[in-house]
């Protein structure tokens, strides 16, 4: 009876020793794998909840990285667009300087033509810059979408240059900025808002100089072309009785003339014989005609003033080139210079405004990048807490398991010696 009990306990001790060695070896091997990978959760079965958290964190990190790569591409495109607008501004500034020099009274007709030739080169440069493409072959100024060449022209009047796209600026999001700027806002001009009108006089010997057009009532501005002729100054017996009469023909944007030929009404404006300027108001627009010399009443019967909208910066430049190049007298040159400077300043104001928007987009891109980097660190910390191994604790546990495994091996060696043959001499 005692012998059976001894055999059973010996076998049980032997099995327990083998099982203990296997378990400790498994735990030691698993912890060694964790130490090698640096992760507490190597497989989803190790900790399903932590594995799910880590997987979500990795997905978010991947999305943030993708957004950051896209943002860098967008930032690069806007940087090039902003730089291009800088080049446009430089070209327009040089254009303006040449226009000012063309108004010098010592210039001959040939010298003004030479200046017009240089102005033409600058106009071509600005037009090419407006159609600049990014590294992917997409226009930098295509607004909400456009053809590969957003700006087309010159076309037949009245719309000599057109924006071949959908005006507007794509909004920035929480993680992205637009790839392009609104070229329509930068280079195209609105008669109602900008009021860029070119005024020319067909009489080269005129003593009247037209000033810049201003918008007095935007609701009345239609973009029509106006022709003022038969200017007659009627000084009255009293200053308040003085008038200026003129014939007015309006050509609408669709080509319709109002009124028809031969039915042009006479419009009058208040004027005193001592005034040096003649006020003109048509279609919600206001301008003044300055007379030189100031003390004399000009003969205006031969003056025909054409007030024509300039639909784009390129139109303003073309008007300046044509009028300066064709000027035969200092008076007509001064008229062309005055109109060009007035309208160029309007165009440069719009370009500067869009360039400012580009700068704000670049600042926003920097802010987005900073936010995304902080978010990436937060998500990485969440992932690390979910699956990474505490190396200090892991090494300590590994040493404990290694000690236990060594003890299990020694215990097994002792259990193997519990045999009757070991005591037979």
Image: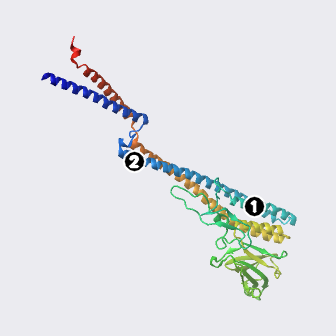
Q: Secondary structure at mark 1?
A: helix
Q: Residues within 10 Å of mark 1 (few under 14, many from 20)?
A: some
Q: Which residue is mark 1?
A: 124
Q: Nearer the viewer, residue 395 or 423?
A: 423
Circle 2 is placed at which residue position? 53
- Of residue 308 and residue 205, the one placed in the foreground of this image is 308
User: Is residue 279 in view?
Assistant: yes
In percent of width and height, residue 23 lies at 31, 32
Image height of 95 relative to 424, above or below: below
Res. 353 image quadrant? bottom right
**Where's residue 264, x and y in %?**
75, 86
Classify 25 as above or below 165. Answer: above
Q: Position of residue 188 (x, y in %)?
A: 67, 67
Q: Is residue 359 above or below residue 414?
A: below
State the SS at label 2. Answer: helix
Q: Earlier in the sequence, mark 2 or mark 1?
A: 2
């Amino acid at each position: 009876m005692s012998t059976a009990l001894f055999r059973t306990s010996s076998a049980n001790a032997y099995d327990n020793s083998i099982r203990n060695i296997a378990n400790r070896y498994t735990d030691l091997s698993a912890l060694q794998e964790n130490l090698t990978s640096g992760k507490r959760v190597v497989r989803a079965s190790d900790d399903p909840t932590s594995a799910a958290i880590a997987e979500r964190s990795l997905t978010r990190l991947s999305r943030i990285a993708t957004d950051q790569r896209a943002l860098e591409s967008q930032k690069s495109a806007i940087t090039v667009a902003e730089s291009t607008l800088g080049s446009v501004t430089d070209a327009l500034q040089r254009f303006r300087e040449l226009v000012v020099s063309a108004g010098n009274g010592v210039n001959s007709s040939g010298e003004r033509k030479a200046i017009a030739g240089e102005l033409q080169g600058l106009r071509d440069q600005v037009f090419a810059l407006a159609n600049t493409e990014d590294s992917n072959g997409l226009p930098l100024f295509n607004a909400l979408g456009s053809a590969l060449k957003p700006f087309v022209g010159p076309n037949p009047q009245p719309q000599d240059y057109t924006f071949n796209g959908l005006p507007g600026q794509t909004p920035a999001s929480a993680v992205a900025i637009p790839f392009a700027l609104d070229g329509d806002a930068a280079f195209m001009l609105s008669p109602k808002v900008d009021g860029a009108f070119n005024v020319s006089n067909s009489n080269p010997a005129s003593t009247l100089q037209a000033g810049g057009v201003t918008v007095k009532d935007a609701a009345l501005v239609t973009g029509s072309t106006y022709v003022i002729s038969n200017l007659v100054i009627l000084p009255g017996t009293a200053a308040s009785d003085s008038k200026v009469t003129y014939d007015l023909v309006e050509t609408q944007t669709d080509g319709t003339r109002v009124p028809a030929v031969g039915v042009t009404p006479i419009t009058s404006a208040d004027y005193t014989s001592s005034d040096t300027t003649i006020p003109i108001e048509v279609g919600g627009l206001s301008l003044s005609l300055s007379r030189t010399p100031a003390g004399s009443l000009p003969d205006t019967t031969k003056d025909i003033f054409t007030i024509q909208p300039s639909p784009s910066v390129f139109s303003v430049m073309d008007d300046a080139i044509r009028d300066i190049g064709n000027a035969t007298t200092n008076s007509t040159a001064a008229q062309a210079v005055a109109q060009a400077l007035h309208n160029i300043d309007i165009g440069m104001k719009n370009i500067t405004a869009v360039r400012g928007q580009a700068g704000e987009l670049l600042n926003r891109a920097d802010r987005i990048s900073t936010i995304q980097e902080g978010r990436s660190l937060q998500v990485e910390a969440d992932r690390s807490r979910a699956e990474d191994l505490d190396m200090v604790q892991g090494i300590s546990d590994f040493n404990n398991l290694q000690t236990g495994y060594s003890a299990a091996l020694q215990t097994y060696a002792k259990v193997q010696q519990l045999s009757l043959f070991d005591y037979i001499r």
